[in-house]
Amino acid sequence: MSSLARTVSWSSKRLRALPSGAVDIVLAVAVTAASVGPAIVMRAPWWVIACCVLASAPVLWRRRAPILVLLVVGPAITVLACLHAMPALPYGTIICVYTIAACSPTRPRRVALTSVSIGIRHPKLPARNGFGSQARPSF
């Protein structure tokens, strides 16, 4: 076994040994910082920053109530999309969808993932301007 494979194996074992609560706290802080940081730098109004927090901080409770967390994170990221104030990626939504796909029973998983798919492609959401770019409001 190569040294890289040993290092990856050792790292993987160490990460799995960490308490899940500590991992969730670190993940929630990182996701919240990645979502709120750009809004603060852009000097967004307080309510945009509050939506950014709502779109990311509930990730802390993703293992306890993944569908409920998605019901908070999803609308918050939708509001940010309508305001053209989304972070680079919808980090909270991505983590919630992963958690639901990995941990939920079959029926709730299907309902949640189908709802997310419909929400992403809903025709009444504002379209992006150009290919992959968003119009940024001047706050």
Image (cartoon, rainbow, N blue to C red):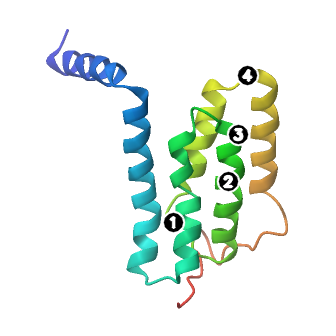
Which of disc 3 and disc 2 is earlier in sequence?
3
Q: Are marks 1 and 4 in contact (CB under 8 Å)?
A: no
Foreground: disc 1 or disc 4: 4
Q: Quadrant of residue 24?
A: top left
Which of the numbered marks, if any, corresponds to residue 72? 2
Q: Is residue 37 above or below residue 63?
A: below
Q: Is residue 46 above or below residue 131?
A: below
Q: What amino acid type should be assigned to the residue bearing mark 3?
A: Ile
Image location (x, y in percent) of residue 106: 77, 22
Which of disc 3 and disc 4 is earlier in sequence?
3
Q: Residues within 10 Å of mark 1 (few under 14, many from 20)?
A: some
Local SS, label 2: helix
Most extreme residue toward the top is: 1
Q: Are marks 2 and 1 in contact (CB under 8 Å)?
A: no
Which of the numbered marks, if any, corresponds to residue 87? 1
Foreground: disc 1 or disc 3: 3
Q: Is residue 96 above or below residue 11?
A: below
Local SS, label 3: helix
Which of the numbered marks, if any, corresponds to residue 67? 3
Which of disc 3 and disc 1 is earlier in sequence?
3
Report whether 35 appears left or right of 8: right
Local SS, label 1: loop
Q: Quadrant of residue 96?
A: top right
Which of disc 1 and disc 2 is earlier in sequence?
2
Q: Residues within 10 Å of mark 2 (few under 14, many from 20)?
A: some
Which of disc 4 and disc 1 is earlier in sequence?
1
Q: What amino acid type should be assigned to the residue bearing mark 4?
A: Pro
Q: CA distance from mark 2 to mark 4?
A: 20 Å
The residue pinned by badge 4 equals: 105
